[in-house]
């Protein structure tokens, strides 16, 4: 049986997730795209999804509308050993407060990666430096929600600081589900041209501008992609993945450039669907092992 043989089928429901990663011979899952936020902010985010706000564009029921404790217990039951607490500001004056909350949340939460965020505003260099000193391992940047230009002058030293630190930045730079501000591969691509050592994880495989973001992986060896919502029954909301890029997706995954992301809890289906969708690509167990654990572990993404 060849190394690329398909040995593992996807889980049919959340109860089958542990058997999925156990069959792959993994110690669990590393999910780089999980959201935990201050309760009032998360409630407002859920209200925005409920109302199908302008940046959502369609009905989007939240599957895991539970307390923090219930969601943490569910991640543990699934075998998600390491996960982020991605939070993001939509206006100036929020980021530093969010960082205080997410870093504290990680300190008291087993498996949670210390996570921080930023916004183009006075003082951003100082609070990003402080977050790094406090142990932030991953940053989150949401260009679609924030609606800002990543090329703003105030951010240039910040990108340089993160590049020098080698800290991964999960960036929602694609225009899905609704284009806003400075999304698309052009603006963030210029940031990468200026800071080629920046470790960037492009969320949602860059949907819907897949071609442009996949091209960035050719030009920059420290650009990664996360699988968030890709190939699920809901993925068309972000943009249909083109078949012509499937060979590149396979090769990038085997090279450790594709990371598991889910968008938990803000998804309208069971967590298992994301894993099943990836298994159904038929790229084989070595690919799944890289995506579900090894690539993120190699990047140094580890929980508390």
Image (spheres, helix red, strand yellow):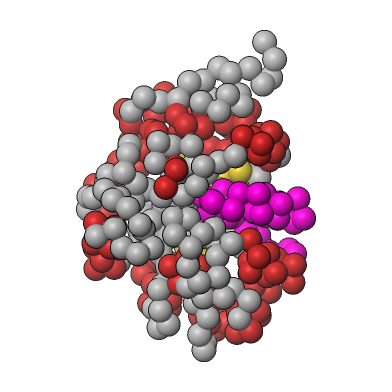
Q: Find the magenta span and give its range.
A: 196-225
Query: Quadrant where the N terminus lies?
Result: top right
Seen from this angle, which residue lies furthest top? 1
- How far from the left and from the top, in percent, is residue 15? 31, 28
Q: Is residue 219 magenta?
A: yes
Q: Is residue 136 visible?
A: no
- How far from the left and from the top, in percent, is residue 33? 46, 51
Q: Is 224 drawn above or below residue 240 in the view shown?
A: below
- How far from the left and from the top, in percent, is residue 153? 63, 84
Q: Residue 133 versus residue 13: which sits nearer the camera? A: 13
Please state the total of marks drawn on the protein image.
0
- The image quadrant of residue 284 is top right
Residue positioned 22% across, 53% down in the render: 67
Residue positioned 44% across, 55% down in the render: 177
Query: Quadrant where the C terminus lies?
Result: bottom left
Residue positioned 63% across, 76% down in the render: 151
- How far from the left and from the top, in percent, is residue 13? 33, 28
Q: Is 56 drawn above or below residue 254 in the view shown?
A: below
Q: Residue 66 versus residue 89: which sits nearer the camera? A: 89
Residue positioned 43% across, 67% down in the render: 145
Seen from this angle, which residue lies furthest right? 219
Q: Is 67 drawn above or below residue 243 in the view shown?
A: below
Seen from this angle, which residue lies furthest bottom? 122
Residue 46 lies left or right of residue 135; in this view the side is left
- The image quadrant of residue 163 is bottom right
Q: Is residue 44 visible?
A: yes
Residue 235 lies left or right of residue 53; in this view the side is right
Q: Is residue 276 magenta?
A: no
């Amino acid at each position: 049986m060849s190394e690329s043989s398909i040995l593992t089928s996807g889980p049919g429901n959340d109860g089958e997730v542990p058997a999925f990663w156990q069959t792959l011979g993994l110690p669990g899952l590393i999910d780089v795209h999980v959201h935990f936020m201050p309760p009032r902010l998360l409630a407002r985010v859920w209200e925005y999804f409920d109302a199908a706000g302008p940046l959502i564009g369609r009905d989007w029921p939240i599957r895991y509308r539970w307390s923090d404790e219930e969601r943490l217990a569910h991640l543990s039951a699934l075998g998600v050993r390491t996960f982020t607490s991605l939070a993001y500001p939509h206006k100036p004056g929020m980021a530093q407060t969010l960082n205080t909350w997410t870093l504290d949340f990680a300190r008291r939460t087993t498996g949670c990666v210390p996570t921080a965020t930023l916004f183009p505003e006075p003082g951003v260099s100082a609070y990003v430096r402080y977050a790094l000193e406090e142990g932030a391992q991953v940053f989150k940047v949401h260009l679609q929600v924030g609606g800002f230009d990543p090329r703003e002058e105030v951010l240039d030293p910040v990108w340089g600081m993160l590049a020098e630190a080698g800290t991964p930045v999960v960036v929602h730079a694609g225009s899905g589900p609704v284009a806003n501000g400075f999304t698309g591969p052009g603006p963030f691509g210029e940031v990468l041209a200026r800071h080629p050592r920046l470790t960037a994880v492009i969320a949602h495989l860059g949907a819907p501008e897949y071609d442009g973001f996949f091209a960035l992986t050719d030009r920059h060896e420290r650009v990664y992609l996360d699988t968030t919502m890709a190939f699920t029954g809901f993925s068309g909301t972000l943009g249909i993945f083109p078949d012509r890029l499937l060979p590149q997706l396979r090769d990038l995954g085997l090279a450790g450039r594709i990371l598991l992301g889910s968008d938990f809890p803000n998804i309208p289906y069971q967590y298992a669907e994301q894993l099943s969708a990836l298994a159904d690509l038929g790229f084989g167990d070595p690919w799944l092992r890289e995506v579900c654990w090894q690539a993120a572990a190699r990047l140094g993404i580890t929980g508390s």
